Image (cartoon, rainbow, N blue to C red):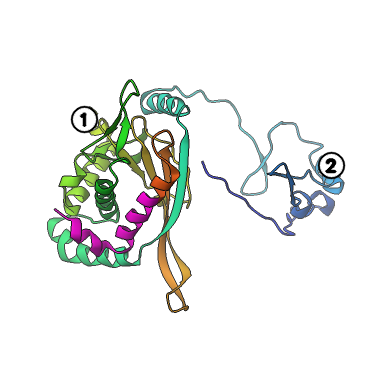
Amino acid sequence: HTHTSQRFDNATLDPPAGSSDPAKFAPLSNVYTQPQVSNGMSHIAPPTHAYAAAAASATSGATSGYVGFGGKGKLEGVKEDKHVPVRGYMRAMIKTMQAQTQVPHLVFSDEYGMDALVALRRRLQLQQAEKQGIKLTYMPFIVKALSMTLSEFPEINASFSDDQQHVIERAAHNVGIAVDSPNGLVVPNIKHVEQLSILQIAHELARLADLARANKLAQQDLAGGTITLSNIGAIGGTYMSPILVPGEAVIGAMGAMQKVARYSADGSLQPHMIMTMSWAADHRLLAGATVARFSNRFKELIQDPALMLVSLR
């Protein structure tokens, strides 16, 4: 769930070859006028009369209620409806999402510097991971940093009891990883991350990803998660509004890593690698200030991974 705004300035649609009526291809600035504000909400003003007339003229010969522009400028539409059975992971996802609409979500987002972690991962991949035949990505470091932060904030790794009369702070850090498998969204979890090394986490991530792609995840791989991470940024996007997994208090969504210009401490403008992070929390269990402090500590470990050495066991 993301909100995206776009601006179009004096862009035009070029008329097709042989067209003698440029009025049908009016500037887009006539379509999207400045947002109007009313009662704190913004909306797009309707198109101008000039464009409305041109649009009516351009589409007067259309025979379909749906019109779209294809890659070659031709009008295209859906030829016929397709009925797709709801089964498997999709059925489970529908049930899960419907249940989570009853949970008040609190969303907190921030930007994390990744320069130190980028350098550390590159060095360890060459010195250690390749010797063991393991592809070391950023995710094992992030998962381990999350577990270390949970040790300082046990209320994040919590859930309600079945009768909602108690809050259970879970000892095990079972970190779920949202996987976009060929059969739909699945969330297997790595058990007892607090007891695993970074290379062990990398091995578990690879195992779960392979099983998810082959549709061979066992029930024990899917059950028992206590907190979830979604690496949606691997596909694209920055800030998100992730939806909680039932029985968990927090989920984190990582945006795409980007090289951007940022001011350094000496005031100079330098290139830096950054990653956006969006946390969603069960507002019945957690206050915004708690989530912010949790994120700040997690951010410290990500931006200076050497700090993790202090807490490694």
Asked if residue 11 is positioned above or below residue 92 in the image, the reply reads below
Q: Is residue 84 visible?
A: yes
The main secondary structure of the magenta stretch is helix
Q: Give the number of the mark in front: 1 or 2.
A: 1
Percent x, y of residue 215: 28, 32
What residue would you read off at disc 1? 220
Q: Is residue 15 visible?
A: no
Residue lying at 33% horizontally and 30% vertically, measured from the top left: 247
Residue numbers of the magenta segment: 293-313
Residue lying at 82% horizontally and 37% vertically, measured from the top left: 60
**50 and 79: which is toward the camera:** 50
Three-letter code, disc 2: Ser
The answer to whether 105 appears left or right of 229 in the picture is: right
Label at residue 57 = 2
SS at circle 1: helix
Residue lying at 84% horizontally and 42% vertically, measured from the top left: 57
Say few, some or many: other residues with alpha carbon within 10 Å of mark 1 (under 14 / 14 to 19 / 20 or more). few
Magenta region includes residue 64: no
Magenta region includes residue 311: yes
Asked if residue 174 is positioned above or below residue 276 in the image, the reply reads above
Three-letter code, disc 1: Gln
